[in-house]
């Protein structure tokens, strides 16, 4: 009788739990569950399981619940329904929907606005993290098509905003929209690299580079440092992808990339440094890690070009006032060494041919 009374008391306590225990504190229901399981009170166990399966959990509580459930075995497994692995079809469906929100393919989502898109971008990036199933999802043709559509629409929006920036009274408003598009493109760089689609981004960026530079170098926009810096940040990702072989391009395209962006970056860097030195609160300083990355990528890019193209680029670099922006001395040293080696090989080859001809005579 005492055992039955104890079970009844536990049962009633568990039924009342949602009235007097905060939803974020699950200690008592877990205690009830363990005691009831030990006493073989099935009705109490069932009540506790139903309660724990239904209420919200804090992230910190999830680990504790997992420990308890693993100790109790099958009777408590329904509690874990919310964290069971999803099959690939379900994962792909969620991922595609997240891509659509993240790239605004489905248009604005009032009343959430950009918050939903930002959240979707974070989740897409998180989902592409370490997970043995995600490479299969990311390689799916339908998923890649959605990403390409999103990339195309984001670039179209970016180009459209660029074309509007000189319209009367629209400059500041358009600048904000361009910056948002650049933020979206920067995010897409990270995602496309993980999905093996960075080549699409790089090719498009090179195609519109002249248009971008024509806008950001216009005298009317000479004080839009935030816009110029963000353009360089996105370009740095392109340089990095091409310079280190993540994206393979023909030599003429690599030459075009360097010749377009080297003069602009070389001119902008010392200006931002000078303004930062004059004003400690200047918000548009170029991050040193990013600058080191740009220099490294450019050295790698230049060193991999045909020797004549290297010579043209290095000659322009040495004629500039600021040799440190960027420092291509390593590429210059490599070019000098290769040039001498090539000359020795050429002379050696010609000498060998002459000797061979003499012997044959």
Image (tube, rainbow, N blue to C red):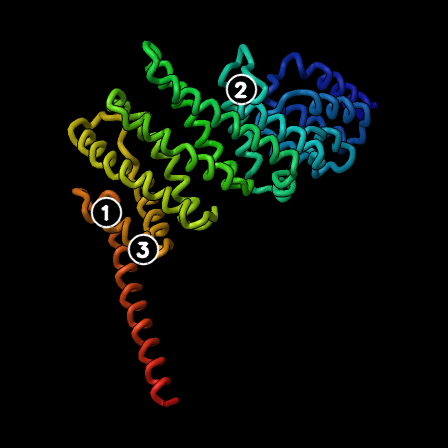
Horizontal and vertical percent for residue 254? 39, 46
Crowdedness near tag 3: few (<14), some (14–19) or many (≥20) residues, C-alpha within 10 Å? few
Mark 2 vs mark 1: which is more N-terminal?
A: 2
Mark 2 vs mark 3: which is more N-terminal?
A: 2
Viewer-closest of 139 and 82: 139
Task: Determine which residue is flagged by label 3.
Answer: 308
**Where on the picture, by quarter, is residue 344?**
bottom left
Task: Determine which residue is flagged by label 2.
Answer: 116
Q: In terms of secondary structure, where does tag 2 sit?
A: helix
Q: Is residue 69 left or right of residue 7?
A: left
Q: Which label lies toward us, 1 or 3?
A: 3
Contact? badges 1 and 3 (CB < 8 Å): no
Horizontal and vertical percent for residue 335? 29, 59
**Where on the picture, by quarter, is residue 66?**
top right
**193 relative to 19, above or below:** below
Q: Is residue 302 left or right of residue 190?
A: left
For the residues labelled 2 and 3, the Cα–Cα distance comes to 50 Å
Viewer-closest of 66 and 199: 199
Contact? badges 2 and 3 (CB < 8 Å): no
For the residues labelled 2 and 1, the Cα–Cα distance comes to 45 Å
Residue in view at x 63 percent, y 44 percent: 132
Q: In terms of secondary structure, where does tag 3 sit?
A: helix
Q: How many marks on residues?
A: 3
Q: Which label lies toward us, 2 or 3?
A: 3
Task: Determine which residue is flagged by label 1.
Answer: 317
Viewer-closest of 169 and 33: 169
Q: Which label lies toward us, 2 or 1?
A: 1
Viewer-closest of 300 and 275: 300
Q: In terms of secondary structure, where does tag 1 sit?
A: helix
């Amino acid at each position: 009788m005492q055992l039955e009374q104890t079970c009844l008391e536990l049962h009633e306590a568990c039924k009342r739990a949602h009235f007097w225990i905060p939803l974020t504190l699950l200690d008592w229901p877990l205690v009830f569950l363990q005691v009831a399981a030990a006493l073989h009170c099935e009705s109490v166990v069932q009540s506790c399981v139903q309660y724990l399966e239904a209420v919200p959990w804090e992230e910190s509580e999830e680990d504790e619940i997992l420990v308890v459930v693993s100790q109790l075995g099958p009777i408590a497994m329904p509690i874990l329904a919310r964290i069971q692995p999803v099959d690939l079809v379900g994962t792909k469906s969620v991922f595609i929907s997240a891509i659509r929100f993240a790239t605004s393919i489905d248009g604005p989502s009032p009343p959430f606005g950009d918050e939903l898109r930002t959240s979707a971008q974070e989740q897409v990036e998180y989902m592409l993290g370490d997970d043995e199933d995600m490479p299969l999802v990311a390689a799916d043709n339908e998923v890649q098509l959605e990403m390409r559509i999103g990339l195309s629409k984001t670039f179209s929006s970016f180009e459209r905003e660029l074309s509007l920036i000189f319209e009367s009274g629209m400059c500041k408003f358009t600048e904000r929209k361009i910056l948002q598009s650049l933020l979206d493109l920067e995010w897409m760089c990270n995602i496309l690299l993980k999905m093996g689609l960075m080549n699409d981004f790089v090719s498009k960026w090179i195609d519109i580079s002249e248009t971008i530079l024509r806008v950001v170098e216009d005298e009317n926009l000479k004080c839009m440092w935030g816009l110029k810096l963000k353009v360089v940040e996105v370009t740095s990702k392109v340089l990095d992808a091409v310079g280190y072989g993540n994206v393979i391009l023909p030599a003429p395209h690599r030459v075009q990339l360097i010749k377009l962006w080297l003069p602009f970056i070389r001119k902008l860097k010392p200006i931002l440094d000078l303004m930062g030195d004059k004003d400690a609160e200047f918000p548009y300083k170029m991050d040193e890690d990013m600058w080191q990355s740009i220099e490294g990528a450019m050295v790698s890019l230049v060193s991999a070009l045909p020797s004549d193209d290297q010579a043209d680029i290095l000659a322009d670099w040495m004629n500039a006032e600021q040799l440190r922006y960027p420092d291509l001395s390593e590429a210059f040293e490599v070019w000098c060494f290769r040039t001498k080696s090539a000359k020795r090989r050429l002379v050696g080859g010609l000498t060998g041919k002459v000797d061979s001809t003499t012997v044959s005579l």
